[in-house]
Amino acid sequence: MNVDPAVQRTLLDLAATDAELARITHRRRTLPEAQEVERLETERQARKDAAVAVQMQVEDLDRDIRKLEREVEAVRSREDRDRKLLEGGTVTPKQMTELQHELETLTRRQGILEDELLEVMEQREASAADHEHAGAQLSKVEDELNEAARQRDEALADLDTAERRCIEQRAQQLPRFPAELLTVYERQRASRGAGAALLQARRCGACRMELDRSVMARFAAAPPELVLRCEECGAILVRTKESGL
């Protein structure tokens, strides 16, 4: 294929535009700001799960407290009833003995229940503090996530702007090239990533392989308009003063 040498050199501009588009695609796929958002989303879910778990623990302790309070109240009511019976003087000696024994048992039971209640209330106080701390941690992560999402969106917007600029530039470059040359270029770009590259100091700018002397001699003897291809990667090689021919 023969193409004007000036047009061949212009192919390097198209290759540079395509290389920039590839870099934009890669950066969008590996955007650090997006990775930070993903990390914070995972952390937020973990913080949320922790807060929910502590909240459930607090609710369980509240139920235990209400249950113990009812039991303490029931014991106190029974004690009051027995004392009134004793003070009323209407019971028999046997009943009096039984009531006194029951009061002793109720007093011990009340003491045990009140100790349990105090312990559960202390646990509830500690769990409430844990819940407050978990809520603060969750709020902190959510603030960090909002900021990270803002930075990610700004970075993506910048990439979108750069991509649109490259696409417009590419559209302006394409009419400069013959259809046959573009077909070869696009096929090579689709298969190997770089459709064309500079031949610089005996080295292919696409695959970076150094060409042997026989190939360089053949290239040096080739007419300027002949389109050359790298024998290693197939990229179109553009000759300039830097090619070492």
Image: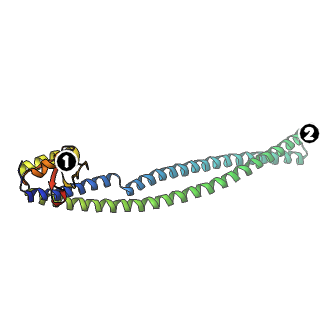
Q: Answer left or right for 135 relative to 76.
A: left
The amino acid type, in three-letter code, at marker 1 is Arg
The residue closer to the viewer here, 22 or 49, is 22
Q: Secondary structure at mark 2?
A: helix
Please name the residue that numbered disc 2 is placed on. Answer: 97
The amino acid type, in three-letter code, at marker 2 is Thr
Count the numbered circles shown.
Answer: 2
The residue at 70%/53% (across/down) is 122
Residue 134 figure quarter: bottom right
Answer with mark 2 or mark 1, whichever residue precedes in sequence: 2
The residue closer to the viewer here, 96 or 164, is 164
Please name the residue that numbered disc 1 is placed on. Answer: 213
The residue closer to the viewer here, 49 or 159, is 159
Looking at the rendered image, the quarter that the C terminus falls into is: bottom left
Taking 134 as reference, is 113 above or below it?
Answer: above
**x, y (%) of residue 195?**
18, 49
Query: Circle 2: is it few (<14), some (14-19), or many (20+) Cα within 10 Å?
Result: few
